[in-house]
Amino acid sequence: ETSSLAATGQAGGEAAASATLKWCVLAFLVLQNSSCMLLMTLSMAEPGEGQWNSQTGVIMQEALKGAICVLLLLVEGDLCAAFADPLEVVKSGVPALLYLIQNNMQYIAAAHLDAPTCAALSQLKVLTTALFSAVMLGRRPSRAQWFALLVLAMGVSIVARSQVG
């Protein structure tokens, strides 16, 4: 009975650690997503010694993400397994290429729009991802998720409308 109590305590500790990790990841993603467009717009607006190329920013973003992924794969010990199936590598390359194009387009938007409008419009990718997921993959969001998407769309509309009028 003592071993079952210890196992229950250990499982509870692992669940709590997992929940804490999930909340930390969520907080980081909220911070990263909310600051990305604002920092991008601010960095392009600051006068400096010279203008910088937005493609350099995108390449550095992708290089940093790639380095972090390789590091995590090395820690997990699955670096070779990640490249074992060439078809899967190609399949994952398509979204990666689309994200690269999207990141370039974000820099173009940041150069031509004010920061609040740019930040609000960049959140539309959440809405379009959910819609494509429902239409193309057959996934059905819950009512609460549809409501959250509706609130997001209304918020974007309000910001865009306030910038026009």
Image (cartoon, rainbow, N blue to C red):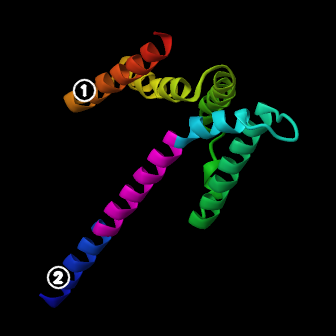
Give the position of the N terminus as an image quadrant.
bottom left
Comes first in the chain, label 1 or label 2 = 2
The residue shown at (27%, 78%) is 10
- Residue nearest the viewer, comparing 1 with 106: 106
Secondary structure beneath dot 2 equals: helix
Q: Is residue 162 left or right of residue 75?
A: left
User: Which amino acid does the dot numbered 1 rest on?
Assistant: Phe
Q: Is residue 159 above or below residue 80?
A: above
Check if residue 27 falls in the magenta segment: yes
Query: For the stretch drawn in magenta, what is the main secondary structure?
Result: helix
Q: Which residue is mark 2?
A: 4
Report the residue that reaches farthest toward the right: 49
- Residue nearest the viewer, comparing 140 with 118: 118
Q: Which residue is mark 1?
A: 147
Q: Which residues are magenta?
A: 16-34
* Residue 88 shows in this picture: yes
